[in-house]
RNA sequence: GGUCCGUUCGUAUAGGGGUUAGUACGCCAGGUUUUCAUCCUGGUAACAGGGGUUCGAAUCCCCUACGGACUACCA
């Protein structure tokens, strides 16, 4: 019996969504769509102490910006609502109780302090404290206390947790789509807390219960969860849900670009690239972290960049739309090793997307920037300019530096060019050129070019002697688009003005 | 420390017993362009180390090294 593919993205609202998380969400989405399945958003907020206001909204806004839609979940609703674990709180206890009834879990009354002390003293002996078959007998729990004592503590309202009883001496097998068979001996596992003293389940319980209830078929999550996957397998078995256990796929981590280690919030701004999809202002410290959106990345480009960090299609195609990614994606082609973010490649991707936009589309995004600078232009003119300069930029924001001379005459001239190109005969040449332009009836780029070339030939001057000077006068530097196209856009009057100004100013 | 996961050019990766170890970004050189950018062509650069298995290993196995994750009443 084939179940309908259902996957979930289950972030914790403890801060802004990290690009590693975005990639996890993306892979989940791609997998779901590829198999005609569902993609749910579940918010895992079982830890009230770490809740950060705005984080949940941030997650949803990020996914919206990226154009990755959920089919079900928080903010959308669906047959398994609610999708926020804090709102599902009453649901979990019964499963913990069920586990206790079946002998797979037990009450424990050790205080945090007691636990900490024993961990410390074990550490002093260079041993690791594991709360399991080996140590249960020395702690305060259902095994060391009589049933009457336990009941009395419970009745007295004493604080307790419910721990999972890891089976003794067993090899636990986790079947991972990406990593194959992973085996861990139960002696290495500890009796994790399933149910906290505050009445909330821990991740482990809530996650398994909700995945079961929501009929999740594939759990695609970060590699940091691999060590606890054996516990989850055991939990499915103990709950009697083994035949409904989802398949696991643990994704490789995103690493920092320099050195090693997991990519973290600090690295991004240190290395000059965002680690968050959207700009984030920490509600407590007020600290601002940059986002891809605000940095000028296109959502399609971010999706494309992220898709290729840990996955490849097995062909040489690198530019993929979201639809194409859905078509090409498979978990089998996800790599095992952590991937480092490459800023240069990311910029290249964005540049590629920028160039592939039409001049009109680019202009639409550029006009607001011009407005901010107090410049009003027609859509047509903006589009013409964008068409001329878009391939010289990685981001929309770089367009201004590439095109400001269209709107504002240069207030200085590149010294290097002056030094190299401004010769004794230059002023005379420039004067002749000015009067040529002054007398030109046709200022269309091509005819103007042809006529000017003819003129240069007639006075016995090579283009190299004057073209750079004219560019310098018009642009202020020696770079930029086709000179005659610039003149055409500037118009005769402005062109002649700028040439005259250069003549007067230089030397 | 323990457990688990990983390791191909600087980066992302292809290749999974016989390849001149391929591609992209970056970088370098040449071409195009009156300039710069784009574009085109070429180049640079990698199988962590050691043992096996095999006629043959980047590929399979083991060990070592290195890196990472986890080791909470956090997720």
Image (spheres, coloured by chain):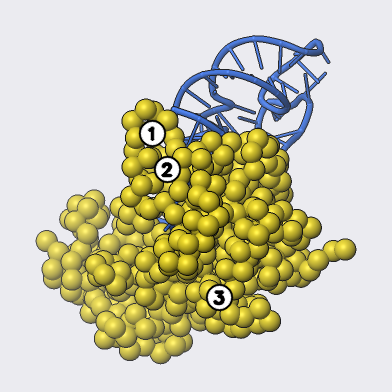
- Output the letter for the chain in blue: B
Residue on which disc 2 sits: A261
Q: Quadrant of residue A405?
A: bottom left
Q: Is residue A204 above or below residue A481?
A: above
Residue A244 visible? The answer is yes
Q: Is residue A418 left or right of residue A382?
A: left
Residue on which disc 1 sits: A122
Q: Quadrant of the N terminus of chain A?
A: bottom right
Find out whether the residues at labels 3 and 1 contact each other: C-beta distance under 8 Å: no
Q: Chain of mark 1?
A: A
As helix, strand or loop, the secondary structure at mark 2 comes to loop
Q: Is residue A449 above or below residue B45?
A: below
Front residue of A388 and A304 = A304
Q: Chain of mark 2?
A: A
**Horizontal and vertical percent for residue A451?**
43, 73
Q: Is residue A226 left or right of residue A254?
A: right
Q: Could you classify mark 3 by the number of other residues whose Cα lies within 10 Å: few (under 14), some (14-19), or many (20 or more)?
A: few
Q: Residue at x 68, y 45 (%)?
A: A174
Q: Residue at x 37, y 75 (%)?
A: A53
Q: Could you classify mark 2 by the number of other residues whose Cα lies within 10 Å: few (under 14), some (14-19), or many (20 or more)?
A: few
**Horizontal and vertical percent for residue A236?**
69, 56
- Output the letter for the chain in yellow: A
Q: CA distance from mark 2 to mark 3?
A: 39 Å
């Amino acid at each position: 019996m084939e179940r309908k593919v259902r996957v979930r993205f289950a972030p914790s609202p403890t801060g802004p969504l990290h690009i590693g998380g975005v990639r996890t969400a993306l892979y989940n989405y791609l997998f779901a769509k590829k198999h005609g399945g569902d993609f749910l958003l579940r918010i895992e907020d079982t830890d009230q102490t770490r809740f950060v206001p705005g984080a949940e909204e941030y997650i949803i806004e990020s996914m919206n910006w990226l154009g990755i839609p959920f089919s079900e979940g928080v903010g959308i609703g669906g047959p398994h609502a609610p999708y926020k674990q804090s709102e599902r709180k009453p649901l979990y206890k019964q499963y913990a109780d069920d586990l206790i009834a079946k002998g797979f879990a037990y009450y424990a009354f050790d205080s945090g302090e007691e636990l900490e002390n024993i961990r410390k003293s074990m550490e002093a002996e260079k041993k690791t404290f594991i709360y399991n078959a080996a140590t249960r007998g020395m702690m305060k729990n259902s095994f060391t206390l009589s049933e009457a004592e336990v009941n009395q503590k419970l009745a007295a309202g004493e604080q307790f947790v419910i721990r999972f009883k890891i089976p003794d001496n067993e090899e636990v097998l986790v079947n991972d789509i990406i990593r194959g068979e992973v085996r861990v001996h139960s002696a290495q596992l500890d009796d994790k807390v399933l149910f906290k003293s505050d009445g909330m389940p821990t991740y482990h319980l809530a996650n398994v219960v909700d995945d079961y209830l929501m009929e999740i078929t594939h759990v695609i999550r970060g590699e940091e969860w691999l060590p606890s996957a054996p516990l989850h397998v055991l939990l499915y078995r103990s709950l009697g849900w083994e035949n409904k256990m989802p398949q696991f796929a643990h994704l490789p981590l995103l690493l920092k670009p320099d050195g090693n280690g997991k990519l973290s919030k600090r690295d991004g701004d240190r290395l000059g690239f965002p680690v968050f999809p959207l700009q984030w202002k920490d509600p407590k410290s007020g600290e601002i972290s940059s986002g891809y959106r605000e940095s000028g990345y296109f959502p399609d480009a971010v999706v494309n960049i992220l898709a290729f960090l840990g996955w490849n299609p097995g062909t040489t195609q690198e530019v993929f739309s979201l639809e194409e990614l859905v078509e090409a994606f498979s978990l089998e082609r996800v790599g095992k090793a952590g991937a480092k973010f490459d800023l240069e490649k990311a910029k290249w991707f964005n540049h590629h997307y920028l160039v592939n936009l039409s001049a009109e589309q680019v202009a639409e995004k550029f006009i607001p920037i011009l407005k901010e600078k107090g410049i009003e232009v027609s859509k047509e003119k903006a589009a013409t300019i964008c068409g001329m300069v878009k391939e010289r930029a990685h981001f929309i924001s770089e367009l201004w530096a590439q095109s400001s001379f269209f709107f504002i005459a240069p207030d200085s001239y590149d010294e290097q060019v002056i030094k190299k190109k401004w010769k004794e005969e230059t002023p005379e040449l420039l004067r002749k050129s000015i009067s040529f332009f002054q007398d030109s009836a046709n200022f269309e780029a091509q005819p103007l070019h042809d006529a000017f070339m003819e003129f240069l030939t007639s006075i016995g001057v090579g283009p190299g002697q004057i073209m750079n000077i004219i560019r310098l006068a018009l642009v202020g530097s020696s770079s930029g688009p086709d000179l005659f196209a610039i003149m055409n856009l500037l118009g005769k009057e402005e062109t002649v003005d700028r040439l005259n100004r250069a003549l007067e100013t230089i030397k």
